[in-house]
Structures are given as structure tokens and as C-alpha cells.
Image: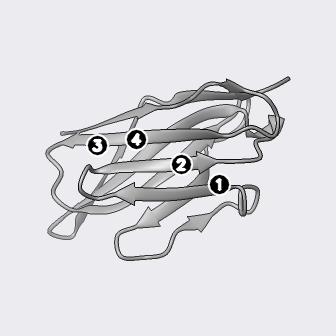
Amino acid sequence: QVQLVESGGDLVQPGGSLRLSCAASGAIFSIYSMSWYRQAPGKQRELVAAIPSGGNANYADSVKGRFTISRDNTKNTAYLQMNSLKPEDTAVYYCNLEDAYYGIVTTYWGQGTQVTVSS
């Protein structure tokens, strides 16, 4: 089993910045990708950013140029640097990890961390 623990969510003013962290632990075999999703009240969960192993990061159009996803493979940790935050970025942010074991990919989710952008 793999556990994901997110941290870094907070209340921030528009234009501010936050850095989310997602630490993975447990029976990790080979991380295929790590991603950040978010879910605002009354809306579906949506992909924010993803960073596959050995590949380029990709972003939702709504966050391009403002958010940056990164990984520290030595710590099995992913980060989401969020700059120029807007009220519409308010949501619960979830970390997602895909673990590959002999071609079988298993998806894990964190418990979520609340980001609120408001003056």
C-alpha cells in the first residue's frame, strides 16, 4: 500500500503564492507519474498538473504560466508551486500517484489539502 500526505494548503490573498507538497511512502515500486488535481465546490475534480517519470510536465490551460509542478525522486515527493493565485483557484487539491509494477499501473490519492484564495 502507498500513502500520500499533502500539505501546504492555506488561506491566501489574490495574487499571493503557495507551495503544496505531497510525500509518498509505503510499498512504492516504480513511480509512473505524479499529479495534482483539484475539486471546487459543486464541480468535478480536474487535472491541474502532471509530471511523468522521464517526461515533460503538463498543465491545465487555466494554470499555465502560474503553477509549476516538480518532483524530488530521492524523497518520493511532488510539489506544486502556485503563483499569482486567483479566487477561482480555490479548491481542495489532491495529490495523485501512479505506480507501475510489471506493467500494471495502480493509482493512489491523497486526502486533499484546502486552498482558499480570498481577500
Amino acid type assigned to the residue bearing label 4 in the image: Cys
Q: Position of residue 101 (x, y in %)?
A: 17, 62
Amino acid type assigned to the residue bearing label 3 in the image: Ala
Label 4 and label 3: CA atoms lie apart by 6 Å
Mark 2 lies on residue: 80
Residue 3 quadrant: top left
Residue at x 52%, y 69% (from the top left corner): 57
Secondary structure of the residue carrying numbered label 1: strand
Choose mark 1 or mark 3, whichever is in front: 1
Q: Position of residue 47 (x, y in %)?
A: 59, 53
Labels 4 and 2 touching (C-beta < 8 A): yes
Amino acid type assigned to the residue bearing label 1 in the image: Phe
Label 1 and label 3: CA atoms lie apart by 21 Å
Residue 22, numbered circle: 4
From the viewer's side, name the closer residue of 113 and 83.
83
Q: Is residue 40 above or below residue 31?
A: above
Residue 95 quadrant: top left
Mark 1 lies on residue: 67
Mark positioned earlier in the residue sequence (2 or 1) = 1
Q: Is residue 21 above or below residue 73?
A: above
